[in-house]
Each structure stands twice: as structure tokens, then as C-alpha cells.
Amino acid sequence: MEKNIFARLIAAALNLQERTVANTLALLEEGCTIPFISRYRKERTGGLDEVQITAISDRFDKLKEIQKRKETVVKTITDLGKMTPELQKRIEDCWDATELEDIYLPYKPKRRTRAQVAREQGLEPLAQLLLLQRERDPERAAERFIKGDVKDVETAIKGAQDIIAETVSEDERSRQQLRNAFARQAIISSKVVKAKADSDEAAKFSDYFDWQEPLKRCSSHRLLAMRRGESEGILRISISPDDEEASDRLKRHYVYGNTPCGKLVAEAIDDGYKRLLKPAIETEFAALSKERADEEAIRVFAENLRQLLLGAPLGQKRVMGIDPGFRTGCKVVCLDAQGNLLHHDAIFPHPPVNKRTESAVAIQKMIHKYQIEAISIGNGTASRETNNFIKDVLAGRYNIDTKKKDELPKPQVFVVSEDGASVYSASKIAREEFPDEDVTVRGAVSIGRRLMDPLAELVKIDPKSIGVGQYQHDVDQTLLKHSLDQTVESCVNLVGVNLNTASQHLLMYVSGLGPTLAKNIVDYRRENGGFTSRAQLKKVPRLGPSAFQQCAGFLRIPEAKNPLDNSAVHPESYPVVEQMAKDQGCSVADLINNKEKREAIDIKRYVTAEVGIPTLTDIMQELEKPGRDPREQIEEFEFDKNVSTVDDLVEGMILPGIVTNITNFGAFVDIGVHQDGLIHISQMANRRIAHPTDVVKLHQHLRVRVIEVDRRRNRISLSLKGI
């Protein structure tokens, strides 16, 4: 019954069919992963994509949390002996967390309040008399309540007002009315803490020393910046509507005229508003606005991570990885086409050592000896200088001491992001991969490998260390991890994984696997050699039918006897393909290689109760290009040779650049001067755009115009307009 309610609520919220939501919830409850449901259960979900299935899953989790909270609320009120059939039904019908807390508030155990003390003194009836506002002389009425701790009329009236203040502040109607006022007109204000105004740590928050704007217009990045300043003790933040108007609106519901009782009730409402109601709703809106800012920041982070993970791979080439540096030199590694470390060395082509010729000869010899096909240079310190040096070496500007000069390969040169390479180099994963090498070697290997296959290498690094987020340490860490893990899982399964070469860490993210099964697969591979078929997975310890169903379609075996084992066709659909081939009088391999035979197939003939048109359409697309990689082809890039520092920049220059990070307010672009420039969202197009991702994507190659250079603050403003 509960699941039917959940399906109905989620369907209404997401504007989806209730049946497809119910089917999706059933699949999730069975333990199916989101990538598996999206790819292989389209008939049951009506073709929902991963974003929609994720939204269903997230709302389902929230509804389960509300249900659990409702059980606590019901038990507490029942134990107090205050549960009524009407109240029970209200709670059962409520699926809004805020409304549920409003219903619960009058019964919620709380510390001893001023109102509670007044009730214990027997002043509740007096509070009710004042609220009715029928007494002409409230002071005379209050005399009847003078006893015990209530020494005089003033104490009695004050206690009654405390009860009124709390009653009004806990009233659902009052709270919702003030929420509406906050939603319409609340202003968020930021002030600097005077004692910190001149401190060095306060400088980065100078924009918010005296700042205010409507809360509903406050962007995610501004709100998170202010909250960070608040957490560091630099700023004080407040959220407030028009206090006078908000308090007056409350009085209209409770004050019936300019009578003595009415004036006392009005005073109580003012007190309750300032002391109880406004602080409660301000806290609520502070949390709500922070939650929304977190969600937006996490969404941007996840999208940047997706673009980074799905970056164009070079593929299996012999690569030289270089971690550039000045004083400590450049760490150089040579990798084979599978990413195995063959050799490492250190060269010192830059100041202060300046062994340029010696370094050039070393590079030339390594290129020749290991037949290097591509060079991957990290984009950190000395990157631009190292790139220029390597280009000079390849252009023959240094003498080479070898008789095989004409046989020297001419590798392509790429600059890659080295964010997270140092984190990887000191990690447990890196120590396990290279127990005998130091962190500098491991870092250079990471730089080389991420050119070959960004996805396979970057999954080894905590996404927060990859450098594509903003305020990632300020947002909800549980929500962030959940979102980023889902993004990594989505990307890994979208691309597919080579079962015979994938690392344990990459296999972890394959649908249905995890750390234990990933390790078992690697151990099985080590003991028995490479897999020759997907069916062999069933021999892996603890990999049962359910895990096989979830993972098999995302694992590839390039040299498998059955060509379908190197495709996204799921083993459960092999009989369908085999029947297609049989009907065409050929083998499955022939069907893949013969376009005419594929075009002769009428997929409607193969529809069954389990296999529908969506699955059959996917199968035909996969037979056309089995195991195709959805990622783009990698392209070489070169910065402007005449620009290497900020001092070389002149307003109006048009320069090549690479997008390094995307935020809500714009995109940061590396133009080769050791300081990224910003293309503000307003400078991205001659039309209004909703988000920078409408125009640019991570690691995209652009041509940008320099519109301002602020050398004092080391800021560069760029534009895409008119280029």
C-alpha cells in the first residue's frame, strides 16, 4: 500500500506515469542499478533515462525518511495521550516534511519555556480570556490568578502573554504566513565582524562586508561564499522580511480591535514574532537556502566531473608523461600501450639548473628507445615552459647523439590537467600499483595515463581533488559524495570496461560489482589468465546470477570468440541476435559485418513479452558499431607563442584557450599565462543564456578576447562575443 502511495506521489511530482514509476521502484527494490535499469529495462520504465530514474530514487529515499519521521511523531503524541482520529488522519495524509513538523510542534518535547512556566502557574485560562478579547478590564480579570508564584497582576498578565506568544508562534497558519513573507520579500544581509575587518583572512570576503540582496535572487555561489565567511568568523549573516509588515499581518488574525485586551494580545504577538517565530523561520530559510545552494553547486560539480571523465581518450599508445617543475626538475616516465611503467628519469631544462641540452638528449633517447607515440605534460608549474622545450626538441633544435636520427618518432604533444595527481601519488591505490616508486614517479604516471584514458585513471582519485568544483568543502558532504559516486558510476557504465585490462578500482564502479567482486575478478584474472567470454564471469567467487545480470552488459572482451561479448548487447538478449542471424542465413559475426543483412531485419518480428521495440532498437544500433566508444576524439592544442605571462596581455587580444572549470557565473579558461581568465556568463553570447554549459564544456578549445587585465588582483576577464 505504501509503495502505491509513493509511486503516486513521485509520479505527480515528476510529471511521470504512475505505472512506470511503480515499475522503476520495483526494479530499485530488487537491487538493480540505475545504469542497468536505464539501459536494459526500457520496456518496464517506458524508456526513462538515468536522470529521471535518479530523481525517482532520490524522491523515494526522501519519502521513506518522512514515513520514518511520521512513525516517531505518531508514537510521541500517542504516548502523551493527545492523539485523536482527526490528528492521526492529518499525519497519515501528510507527505511534506515542513508541514509534518508544524503539526508536531505543539506536542514536541522541548526545554522548559516561559510559556510552560506560565501554564504550570495556572495562567492558561487567563491567556484564553485575553485572546477572546471580551474583557473590558483585563487587569481585574487577572486578579483572580494571583496565587503562589504569581505575586501580582503584572506577573499574571506577563505570563499570559508568554503563553499567547508561544501559541501564535506554534500555530500552523502563523508559520505558513511568515514563510510566505520570507519567500516573497526576505532580504539576505551580510556585515563584516568589525574586529576582523582589517585582517588578511577577511580580504577575500571584502565584497560581502556590507552586502544585501533579495534572498530569492541570491545565487548559489554568492550564498556559499557568505556562509563560508560566516563559518570563518568574518561575516554575520541575517535573513529577514519587512518585520513591521510581517508582524502586522499576524495581528490581523488575532487582534479584533483597539481594546485593552487587544493591545495586550498585540504586545504578545510582537514579542512572539521577534523572540520565537521569526528566529525559527529565519533558521528554516537559512537551512533551505543553503540546501538549495548545495544542490546547485553539487549539480554543477557533477556535470563538470561528467565532462572530465568523458574527456577524449588518446587510446592505447606508448606515452611519455611529464610532471613539469623548475627547481626540482621535470619527472619523466615512459609507459607502454597498456599504461605499464617502463622507465623513469628526471631532467632539468629550466632555471635554476638549466641543463637544457643534456635534458634534450635524454628526451630524444627515451623517445627513440621506447618508441614514444605521444607526450602528456601536466598543466601545473612550468607547464608552458616545458611544452615549449619539448616542441623545440621535436623540431630538431638540439643535436641528437644517435645514428638512427631519421627513425626518431614524432609524437603528438598534449597538455593535460594534473589536478589530483599528487593526491593519487600518495594514495593507497598508487602505493599498491607502484610500491617501489616514490610519489614523483607515481604522479608522472598518472599524468601520462590520463591522456590515454581519462576515465580509467581519474576514477582512482577522490573527485573533490580533481579541481572542477566550487565550494565543494562547504556543501553537504554526504549529498556530494552520493552525487559524485553516481556520476562516476554513470560514466563508467556509459563507456563500458575492458574486462581483461581494467583496474580493480575501475571495475568497482561497474553496475552490480563493488570493491569485493572487483578484487575477485582481478584475482581470478591473475590466476587463470584473461577472460575469453562473459559467461566465464560466473566462475568468479561470489559473483552470483544477480551480479552477473547487472554487470555483464557493461563489460567488454575485445578478443572474445563471440563478438557480442565485446558489445553492449546483454547476454540475456544473445538468443534474439542469434535468431536474427539464423533467419538471415549467417553467423552473428556476419550480421555485424554485413549492413545489407542488418537492414533486411524487421525487428517487429522479434518482439516478445520480455523484449520490446526499445531493446531491439538498441540491439540493432549496437550491431552497427559494436563496443563503440561514446567519447570524442582527442585534439592537439597550442597556446599563443607570443604570450606567456600576465604582463604580455593586452586588452583586445584574441587568444586560444582551454576551459578548465565551469561555474554558475561563468567559465575559467587557461590561456597559458599561469593564471586562468574568467568568461563571465554575460560575456558568453549576444543572447541571454541560462547556464554557461549552454555554450561551453570542460576542456573545450576556444578562442577568447581579453577585455580586462587587473594586475593588482591578478584577474583576467575574457569574452566570447564577436569572435
Image: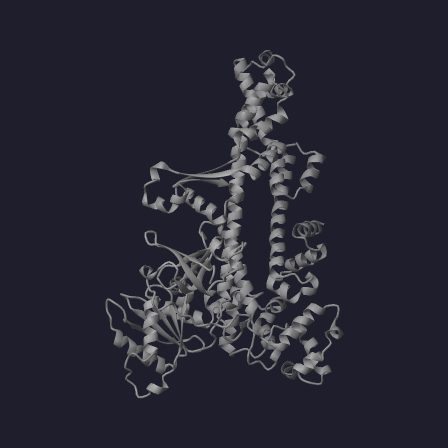
Tell me the residue at 58%/37% (across/down): 179
Residue that appears at 60% across and 49% down: 62
Q: Nearer the viewer, residue 574 or 640?
A: 640
> As displayed, is residue 486 above or below residue 176?
below
Q: Is residue 702 left or right of residue 641?
A: right
**Which is nearer the eye, 64 or 486?**
486
> In the displayed structure, would residue 463 be above or below residue 296?
below
- The picture quadrant where one finds residue 89 is top right
How many discs mark residues in the rendered view? Answer: 0
Residue under the image location 71 percent in, 69 percent down: 613
Q: What's the colour scheme?
A: one colour
* Closest to the observer, 175 or 246: 246
- Image location (x, y in percent) of residue 518: 52, 68
Given residues 477 and 526, the one toward you in this image is 477
Q: Is residue 96 left or right of residue 319?
A: right
Q: Residue furthest bottom?
A: 403
- Res 59 visible: yes
- Image-based side of 138 in relation to 481, left or right: right
Q: Is 220 displayed left or right of 249 in the figure?
A: left
Q: Position of residue 720 (x, y in %)?
A: 46, 60
User: Is residue 462 in view from this perspective?
Assistant: no
